[in-house]
Image: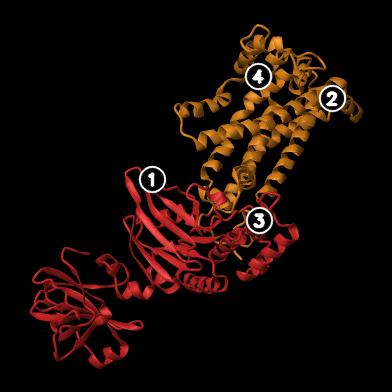
Chain colours: A red, B orange
Amino acid sequence: MSVEVKNVTKKFGSFTALDNVSLKVESGELVALLGPSGSGKTTLLRTIAGLEFPDPGTAQILFYGEDVTQIPASERKAGFAFQHYALFRHLSVFENIAFGLRVRPKTTRPPEAEIRARVDKLLKLIQLEPMAGRFPSQLSGGQRQRVALARALAVEPKVLLLDEPFGALDAKVRKELRRWLRQLHDEIHITTLFVTHDQEEALEVSDRVAILRAGKIEQIGTPEEIYDNPASPFVYDFLGNVNLFSGRMKDGAVVIGETEFSLGEGTGETDTAAVAFVRPHDIRVTRQANGPALAALVLRSNAAGPVANLELKRLDSGEIFNVQLSKEQFQELAPKAGEPVFVELKNVRVFSDDYSI
Amino acid sequence: MAIKLSRSKKIRVLPGFKLTLGFTLFYLGLIVLIPLAAVFWKTSSLTWAEFWHTITMPQALASYRLTFGASLLAALVNAFFGLIVAWVLVRYEFFGKKIVDALVDLPFALPTAVAGITLAMLYSQNGWIGQLLEPLGIKVANTRLGVFVALTFIGLPFIVRTVQPVLEDLDPELEEAAASLGANRWQIFWRVILPMLMPALLTGFALAFARALGEYGSVIFIAGNIPMKTVITPLLIMGELDMFDYAKATALAVVMLVASFVMLLAINVLQWWTNRYNTHNLA
């Protein structure tokens, strides 16, 4: 276990940023902290780095079993990269990366030749060798973030902490850089935690994702686990588009309108109000009902992009929902606005009552 | 550079480059260059030999040493303490902060003669501070130390007011980044904060130094004006003027002018060098 957070609570005045959070990260793992703004994900990362300290109590932070709760950031050996890079603009790229080595006390500072060799190696790793002599103001955003990463890696940290590392970059550079980060992690296997509010980024890059909400970890698991088995309506909603159908529970099934959809497993509950969650791509649209289906009206269709999107309206309750079809399915069906269709729901998830988006 | 740009007829969002540059040159000429040229013009009524004799007479040499030496020292001391004042005003919250902040500007606003008389009274043998220093064998009034004290007094706001806004804008993430890389507090200050403040600090230093060179009112009351010892160059110039020897007076003024210009230029070059990383051309 390389990073362990136990019972950390952090309040800023009356605002609770972290509410008794515990988290374990395996050695060499890449974990994403995902959540909306204000969920406490950055505070958690800063607490691990030693830039914030947990409220006194039973809180503990361990690096490889060693208690670092009271140790300041400068002695924690946690590499930190900021959203806006925080590069030293009066130093060249080379000197930025060398900074952490140069500030070491004389007894542990490597000789000049070794510093040069290490920085050169890192420059190669981030593919910026020709830029060594430039100042940060002469680099693009993506290049700056790579320099910030190299600077954090130069001190050979026990853990790498990235605070929204791609947040300030445009969409294309962002995608490139997160693929590069994944490759880099596969090469050097350093325990990494990174904060993001972009679910796509979290699901694509990380080994495990921790979803935070209002200072608590709502769910933690591999991307597949949390996408396929969301533990709460919040996680379900946060990880992608979702349609809500209000209905009633009936042992092992949910009744929406007049139609009964099987949930595959017995829930025991009967006749309570429930909300069914269905992803837009888990809805099948047909012209004839075979099996349980709802009757709906096509409101709008949009086939631009890799998939086609339909907007439908339930005939019985008037509720509007979205459906995603592949291009092929869309061409086969060729729906027109105002046309009546039937929809079958797959992978229906039910969370008992009063949750609304 | 400026001429090149105007030739290439770049289309700009805001027009008026030629107009504003013309106005700038006209204004500088009227307010600064013409009076300064007059100094040189008046001096030229002297022969080279007379000129050389005037500017190298022992009283003059002694006054240069005092004026430039005390000004430089005062600006250096102000750079150090002014930085601390700016630091305290930016980084900490305390009762009466606004008042302290306002006090910093006082040397700007006070008529220099008032400052001079006040300082002379405080530091005289029977003054509040002077009587405390007397038993220690430290004399301030009527000594070179007095000149230095007066010049330090008038120079402080320049450092504080130039460093303060830069310090306010300094991103705290820079310090956090340095800390996470293992730097201790001293290293963070020396290697991160101070280099960032350097251009502003140099500007403040240059302003305080320039102001001290030309200071007259506050110094003459506390200096005692003992020939060869505590006479500053501006006073020497006044002495020549009192004897209606305008040519000699302007000859001394020329020396001050040229020396000041050279030193300020040197500081500007240094400042440009410390600020060289602030380029904005992307790769």
Local SS, label 1: loop
Q: Is residue B158 left or right of residue A116?
A: left
Q: CA distance from mark 3 to mark 2?
A: 51 Å
Mark 1 highlights which residue?
Answer: A57
Q: Are marks 3 and 2 in contact (CB under 8 Å)?
A: no
Q: Share a chain, discs 4 and 3?
A: no
Question: Relative to A91, is A204 above or below?
Answer: below
Q: Amino acid at mark 4?
A: Ser
Residue type beneath disc 1: Gly
Q: Which residue is mark 4?
A: B218
Give the residue displayed 57% in from the left and 31% down from the top. Answer: B85
Chain ID, mark 2? B
Q: Quadrant of residue B162?
A: top right
Q: Residues within 10 Å of mark 4 (few under 14, many from 20)?
A: many
Q: Position of residue A322 (x, y in %)?
A: 23, 77
Q: In the rendering, at what x and y percent does residue B195 appear? A: 64, 46
Q: The disc numbered 3 marks a residue on which chain?
A: A
Residue identified by numbered label 2: B61
Under circle 4, the secondary element is: helix
Q: Nearer the viewer, residue A327 or B24?
A: A327
Q: Which mark is residue A101?
A: 3
Horizontal side, residue A195 vs residue B69: left or right = left
